[in-house]
């Protein structure tokens, strides 16, 4: 009897792992952590007994099991955090998708239904992304786009990178999620809720009008391609109609982006940061050991900046500039 129950449990676990992979693939290869937890809650039979931490651990177990199977095929589910931070991502998902308070039902061991108590899932900026490890940047692009479209994607990325290095003197929009998060973090770290906002910002985004200047495609072809790139989570579009690089593109092309464009990675987690906070001291530059070129000033994701300024220092570790007053929003 025990052997039979063990086989049933093993089969159920394998089925849940397979269904989660199918769910990720059906979502174009990228899912927020709490989407997957909610999906997992529909699959597990003893759900009503588990804590939030157990759900998270169980999900990670399934992802690890998926990666064991995918490894021989040259694929992997990687974990990537969104640069705007867990608080902002949580609020966005709660408003748009109603993910965080769950009153779902699950089957118990007698195959009846048991109402779960409302459960608030943890704040999370983590996404799970299905990526191809075996191919190069060129073949990853070629698997999705024709030659002209590939050239447009590379050209558009170059425009994003060029624009992102330009620091603009002036006040960023108070409605920006980055501005709101930085203000909240600085107020908590200093105890002063009346700190003046920074007067510099930069953005790795480009307006649609500028992107229509690509010569090898018509305006209609570019508009259709931009829509497809957003659906694939390679690009994203802001409310003001600007485009930037989304998480899936970062996940698949991070090494290419950092090496090709001499980008500085997050001071805390050492991952590519295209949204967050940058040191406002233009003298905060360091020479790259390989290229000999000057790297941009120190940069942090929002959550990494919160950790740094709360637990490490309120001064930039490279140039000693006071980050509380001398920072740049990276929008």
Image (cartoon, rainbow, N blue to C red):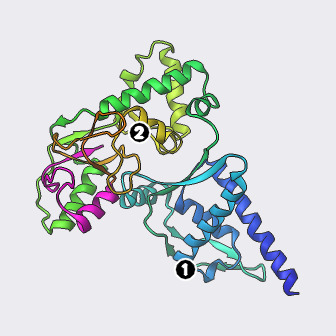
Query: At 12% from the left edge and 53% from the top edge, which residue is drawn?
Result: 325
Percent coordinates x, y for residue 208 in the rendering: 39, 26
- Magenta stretch: includes residue 31: no
| Left or right of residue 279, residue 85 in this image | right
Q: Residues within 10 Å of mark 1 (few under 14, many from 20)?
A: few
Percent coordinates x, y for residue 80 in the rendering: 48, 53
Q: Residue furthest bottom?
A: 1
Label 2: which secondary element: helix
Residue for badge 2: 258
Q: Marks 1/2: CA distance?
A: 39 Å
* Mark number displayed over residue 256: none
Label 1: which secondary element: loop
Labels 1, 2: front one: 2
Q: Residues within 10 Å of mark 2 (few under 14, many from 20)?
A: some
| Left or right of residue 326, residue 23 in this image | right
* Observer-nearest of 5 and 271: 271
Q: Quadrant of the N terminus?
A: bottom right
| Left or right of residue 330, residue 194 in this image | left
Indicate whether 207 appears above or below 104.
above
Which quadrant of the figure has residue 128?
bottom right
Query: At 30% from the left edge and 43% from the top edge, which residue is drawn?
Result: 331
* Observer-nearest of 75 and 38: 75
**Range of the magenta residues?**
302-331
Percent coordinates x, y for residue 247 in the rendering: 48, 45
First of labels 1, 2 by sequence position: 1
Which quadrant of the figure has residue 115?
bottom right
Query: At 45% from the left edge and 12% from the top edge, which residue is drawn?
Result: 215
| Left or right of residue 199, residue 181 in this image | right
* Observer-nearest of 181 and 72: 72
Residue for badge 1: 51
Asked whether residue 103 appears in the rendered view, the answer is no
Percent coordinates x, y for residue 328 in the rendering: 21, 45
């Amino acid at each position: 009897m025990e052997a039979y129950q063990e086989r049933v449990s093993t089969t159920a676990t394998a089925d849940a792992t397979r269904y989660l992979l199918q769910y990720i693939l059906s979502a174009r290869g990228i899912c927020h952590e709490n989407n997957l937890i909610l999906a997992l809650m529909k699959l597990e039979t003893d759900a009503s007994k588990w804590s939030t931490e157990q759900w998270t651990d169980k999900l990670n177990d399934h992802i690890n099991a998926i990666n064991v199977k995918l490894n021989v095929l040259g694929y992997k589910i990687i974990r990537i955090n969104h640069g705007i931070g867990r608080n902002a991502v949580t609020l966005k998902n709660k408003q748009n998708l109603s993910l965080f308070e769950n009153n779902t039902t699950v089957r118990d061991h007698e195959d009846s239904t048991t109402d779960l108590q409302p459960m608030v899932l943890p704040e999370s900026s983590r996404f799970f992304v299905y990526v191809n490890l075996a191919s190069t940047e060129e073949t990853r692009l070629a698997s999705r786009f024709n030659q002209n479209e590939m050239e447009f994607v590379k050209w558009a990325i170059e425009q994003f990178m060029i624009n992102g290095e330009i620091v603009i003197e002036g006040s960023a929009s108070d409605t920006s999620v980055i501005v709101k998060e930085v203000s909240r973090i600085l107020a908590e770290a200093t105890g002063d809720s009346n700190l003046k906002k920074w007067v510099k910002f930069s953005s790795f985004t480009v307006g649609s009008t500028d992107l229509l200047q690509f010569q090898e495609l018509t305006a209609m072809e570019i508009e259709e391609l931009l829509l497809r790139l957003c659906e694939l989570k390679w690009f994203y579009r802001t409310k003001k109609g600007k485009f930037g690089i989304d998480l899936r593109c970062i996940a698949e092309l991070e090494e290419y982006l950092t090496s090709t464009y001499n980008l500085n990675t997050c001071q805390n987690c050492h991952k590519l940061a295209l949204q967050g906070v940058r040191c406002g001291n233009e003298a905060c530059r360091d020479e790259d050991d390989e290229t000999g070129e000057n790297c941009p000033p120190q940069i942090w994701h929002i959550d990494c900046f919160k950790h740094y300024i709360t637990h490490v220092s309120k001064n930039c570790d490279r140039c000693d500039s006071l980050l509380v007053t001398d920072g740049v929003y990276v929008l």
